[in-house]
Image: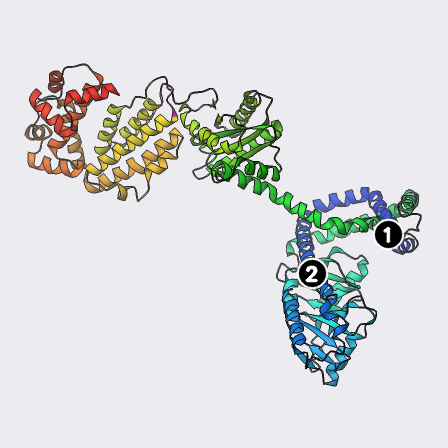
Amino acid sequence: MFGWGIRRLSARQSRHYRNILILLLIIAAVPGLILGAVLHEVAGGLVERELHARHVKQIAQRAHNLDETLSNIELTLTHWAFDPKFDYSLSGHSFVTGFERARDITKTLIVMAGSSPLAKKVELYLPEDGPLLFSPEYWRVDRREEKDAYDYIMKAGTLTYWGEYAYDTSRPYNKDLTLVHHIPGGSPDPFGALIVRLDNQKLSGLLQTMAPYGDGESFLMSKSGDIMATAYGHDPASPFIRTLRDRIRTEGALDGDFFLTLDKTKYTVSYGTLSRINDEWIYVSASPISSITAPVVTVSRWILALSGAVLLVAGLLAWLASRRLYSPIERLVRVLLGGKAVASEDEFKLIERRWLDLNRESRELQTKLDRQLPNVKEGFLHQLLQGYLSSYSEADLLDRMRHYRWEVDDRQFVVLFMRLTGFSGLEGRFSSGDEGLVTFAGVNMIEELAHQRFEQADVMNFHDLTAGILLILPNDRPVLEMVVPFCDEATQAVNQLLRMRLTIAIGRPTRLVSDLPMRFEEARQAVSFRVFESRNQVLDLESARLTEEASEPRYPFTLEREIIQAMRTGRTDEADRLLALFLDTLSEGGAKEIDVQQGMLHLLGSLQHAIMLSGINPSKLFKGVNLYERLSSIREPGRMLSLFRERVLKPYQAELESRSDGHVKKMIEQAMIYLQENYSHDISLDNCAEHIGTNPFFLSKAFKQVTGKNFIDYLTELRMERAKELLRESDLKINDVAVRVGYQHSYFNRIFKKQEGVTPTQYRELNRAT
């Protein structure tokens, strides 16, 4: 009864009046809808709504794609129907003598068929001369059945229309969905027709995309209910399709969605209209919902009953209110339309139609540009800062930036380079390999702060715990006054939320875009001169001189020797302790990151040299991994130590254990300790063997096997290292140095020059000079 009332009102009033009435019904029914929604959520309706919403969204998008495909076919055919090739000059033309025009028409029809993936064939029918048919080649229609079929197409009362026709008289049930346009276009007296026959298989394939779950059905039907195409070939008379068709008729609306239960299977159904030339089609998509929604059926019925009762009460109130609310809208439309009566369609569409066609293309292009602009800007910045646009002039670069909607006139440019440190301290929250995730979180945070403080700020994520920011600032304000507060705010946010530290290098400002690659590289290199401590740092390249240091870094040669000794003797724990002490020594006194990293690279080279001398191939031990490259990319002390432990010490220890048993290793360890404690005395292989309780021959062989060096070579190396240390760090005379390391003066000079290539005096002078 209520629906009948709405139909009577909409017959007398405009569509907009009906929309107002429906809107008021919805508003008036809010209390009932809220109560129904609460009950539905308690009963588990959230699952059902989620699945249904996904289906409706997918089907709407795919129906839009189908509509665009069919619209393209209609537009293309209309274009060709008005083409001079298909004017009245074709009527009465002899295609036998004028075969060149027949060949031209055949080529045109082939091109038309290839312009759409759904077109199976494009034909030209000329009933007066023969009749003739181009399909796409020219031939005369002689069979009566075929002539009747094509003449039936010509009898339609409209110039352009869709239909289903059987072109093979032996198979009358095999029909093709066809678009017909009489020619010439716009003529009241057509003499022929252009016919586009769609490929049923391709159309079915396109419809299958509207049944995404592999079961169910999707189909097209006319407003009268005739099935025009199906996705999976169900019989139009099957109970499933018949039930769907009847339900859509019952719904009454031109588009919508609902649930349908058939044969104990619940389906989510979406349908809508596709506006075609002189017709409207209805697309229908039905896909099954999992059986997990079965328990909500009973509760949903109660919800519908309760909501229906509320709607009945609200309907009367809405009907009364809508009549009064609509009157000012009707007066406004009469004024806008010059006093004309309100049509039976939506009033706003009458106004909208006048400018919609003119602005549609512009809006579509603008939408595409807005979507792609952030990606284009980011790609441009990466190319610019990395120097790939160096061949462009300053004017060209400014023009491109203006094109990408940057304000660059009367502006100065500042590049910031940021590095997140302290990643190794996040153990437990993140693991190795999560650097990209942490960088993403930090960059998003910094980007949000930058957009709050600056009108133009673009952040670049390098996905390796570093990021860059390009700031475009006014010329009339000091850079540090604007940038330093932002750096402080970003630092606090990273400290509090990520539990990490932030180093920021503020590049020197410039007014030339072409200078930005150099400014960016300066800022990136400047971060290497940060103090190697876990603290926040802001480096201003405009005022700081980063390459000048308060003191020269000291390399702990003694600790290096002790690490090598502990590693050779298999004392992994001791080597690990010394390694941490080595890094602490390098880092103390405000050491720069670049100095610490160079020192660790030098230590890696010394350890690799010691491994080679022990008879082990480093490449095989490291499994082909370039440790220098990996160490160069690490900025965290904890991760540096982890690389040495996991990639150097442990593999070397395992290799040593596989080469010698525990007794021999312990014996050689005792021998090496004896040499370290007594190298300043007269030591021979015999008295060392006597000290550890073995014979000289076995000691010599075992010493070479475990350490990779001869006994005398190891002792010489030990004495030379101590001698170099005394020459560098003390003022002892050369004679005293020789005695301290167990040599006579003359022999010491000779062996030192043989080992190091210079005399002791020259070595001291060279090291004092540096």
Residue 670 lies within the magenta run: no
The kind of secondary structure the magenta stretch mainly shows is loop
Closer to the chain start, of discs 2 and 1, is 1
Mark 2 vs mark 1, foreground winner is 2
Q: Residue at x 68, y 52 (%)?
A: 57
Q: Which residues are magenta?
A: 588-592
Q: Which residue is mark 1?
A: 15
Quarter assignment of residue 189: bottom right
Circle 1 SS class: helix
Is 182 or 284 nearer to us in this picture? 182
Is 147 or 487 nearer to us in this picture? 147
Tell me if residue 302 can be seen. Answer: no
Q: Amino acid at mark 2?
A: Asn
Q: Which residue is mark 2?
A: 72
User: Which quadrant of the rendered structure holds the C terminus?
Assistant: top left
| Above or below for 332 versus 172 | above
Structural distance between the alpha carbons of marks 2 and 1 = 29 Å
User: Which quadrant of the rendered structure holds the N terminus?
Assistant: bottom right
Is 647 or 756 nearer to us in this picture? 756
Is 398 or 379 nearer to us in this picture? 398
Tell me if residue 226 can be seen. Answer: yes
Residue 590 lies within the magenta run: yes
Q: Which mark is residue 436?
A: none
* Residue 126 at x, y percent in the picture: 75, 77
Q: Residue at x 62, y 33 (%)?
A: 407
Label 2, residues with CA under 10 Å away: few <14, some 14-19, many ≥20: some
